[in-house]
Amino acid sequence: FQLVPHLSHSPDLVLSDYYLFPKMKKWLSGR
């Protein structure tokens, strides 16, 4: 995954990224 420049202008997207990435990792490792 890579950060897109426009994300830095959208705090909500950044927060959702930090919140979702751990969940995605857990989900991916659980497969």
Image (tube, grey):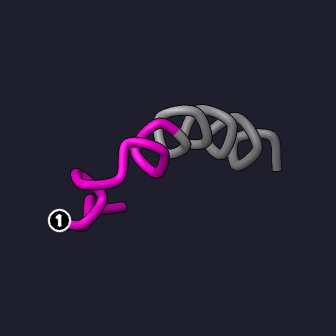
In the rendered image, the residue lying farthest to the right is: 31
Specify whether residue 11 is painted magenta.
Answer: yes
* Residue 18, placed above or below residue 5: above
- Stretch of the chain drawn in magenta: 1-15
Specify whether residue 16 is painted magenta.
Answer: no
* Residue 24, placed above or below residue 18: below
Question: Looking at the magenta stretch, what is its main secondary structure?
Answer: helix
- The residue at 37%/42% (across/down) is 11
Q: Residues within 10 Å of mark 1 (few under 14, many from 20)?
A: few
Image spot of residue 18 (x, y percent): 47, 35
Is 22 or 18 nearer to us in this picture? 18
Image spot of residue 26 (x, y percent): 70, 34
- The residue at 68%/36% (across/down) is 23
Image spot of residue 21 (x, y percent): 54, 41
Residue 1 in the figure: left or right of residue 6: right
Residue identifier under label 1? 5
- The residue at 47%/36% (across/down) is 15
